Image (spheres, rainbow, N blue to C red):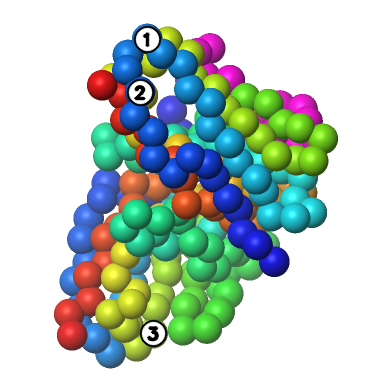
């Protein structure tokens, strides 16, 4: 079974731009969660989608948003990029609730 | 806010020795815990998990111990190999928090050949 895939793997953007990242979960998984990883803050939860509905949201500004499609694929969007948004963005998928989450390789976003 | 784990320390062990990585959690409502391994340039990889109704769980060369009294979690790796070199994270989940994981700061494990 294929693992979690994320595209693109690397991205360079300029301050003020917006970006969309994509995540395809493991086949059959209905939950997709997004995390931001930085050297200073570590791994921080952004939001979770389950059956196309946002179920949980972390403590991030409204510039960070996401959505999930009927095939469980998910996208996250960051608008008005700031230098501090440079990070590894990780997507994780899970069958349901309260079980193992499997991570993708991440998208490395650099904001200049 | 609530957090799990320690600042990023480094554990250096000799190949073949056993490794013990520790993690403290602060939320007594947490009922599910996971250990992940992250190698450079990769996403976190699931190692082992444990629920709060258990004290110990064993996998292949790994054992997780949970002490709810002192809110402490540990990962034991037997016969540590060079391929075990990575950063290890513990994460917690609460029953009413969907799949939101709170991660610790991580521990870097370095295995000397």
Dot 3 and dot 1 within a common chain: no
Q: Residue sitting at 18 percent across and 85 percent down?
A: B113
Question: Looking at the image, is A1 positioned above or below residue B2?
Answer: below
Question: Mark 2 sits on what residue?
Answer: A13
Mark 1 is surrounded, within 10 Å at the Cα level, by few (under 14), some (14 to 19) or many (20 or more) other residues, namely some
Residue A3 is one of the magenta-drawn residues = no
Judged from the image, the secondary structure of the residue bearing numbered disc 2 is strand
Subunit that carries the residue with mark 3: B
Q: CA distance from mark 2 to mark 3?
A: 44 Å
State the residue position of label 1.
Answer: A16
Give the image quarter of residue B72. Answer: bottom left
Residue that label 3 marks: B78
Establish whether labels 1 and 2 are both on one chain: yes
Q: Nearer the viewer, residue A30 or A44?
A: A30
- Asked if the stretch drawn in magenta spans residue A51, the answer is yes
Task: Give left or right: position of B80 versus A27.
Answer: left
**The magenta stretch spans which residues?**
A48-65
Q: Position of residue B61 (x, y in %)?
A: 46, 84
Chain hosting mark 1:
A
Residue A15 pos. (x, y %) = 32, 14
Q: Where is residue B58 drawn, in percent x and y?
A: 56, 79
């Amino acid at each position: 079974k294929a693992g979690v895939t994320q595209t693109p793997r690397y991205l360079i953007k300029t301050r003020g731009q917006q970006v969309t990242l994509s995540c395809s979960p493991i086949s059959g998984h209905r939950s997709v969660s997004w995390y931001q990883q930085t050297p200073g803050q570590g791994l921080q939860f952004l939001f979770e989608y389950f059956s196309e509905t946002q179920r949980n949201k972390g403590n991030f500004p409204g510039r960070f948003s996401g959505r999930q499609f009927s095939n469980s694929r998910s996208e996250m969007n960051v608008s008005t990029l700031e230098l501090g948004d440079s990070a590894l963005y990780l997507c994780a998928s899970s069958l349901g609730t309260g079980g193992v989450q499997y991570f993708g390789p991440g998208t490395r976003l650099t904001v200049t | 806010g609530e957090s799990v784990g320690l600042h990023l320390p480094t554990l250096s062990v000799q190949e073949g020795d056993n490794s013990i990585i520790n993690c403290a959690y602060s939320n007594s409502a947490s009922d599910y815990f996971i250990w992940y391994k992250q190698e450079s340039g990769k996403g976190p990889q699931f190692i082992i998990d444990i629920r709060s109704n258990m004290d110990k769980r064993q996998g292949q060369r790994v054992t997780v111990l949970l002490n709810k009294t002192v809110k402490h979690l540990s990962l034991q790796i037997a016969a540590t190999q060079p391929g075990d070199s990575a950063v290890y994270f513990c994460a917690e989940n609460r029953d009413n928090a969907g799949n939101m994981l709170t991660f610790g700061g991580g521990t870097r494990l370095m295995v000397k050949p």
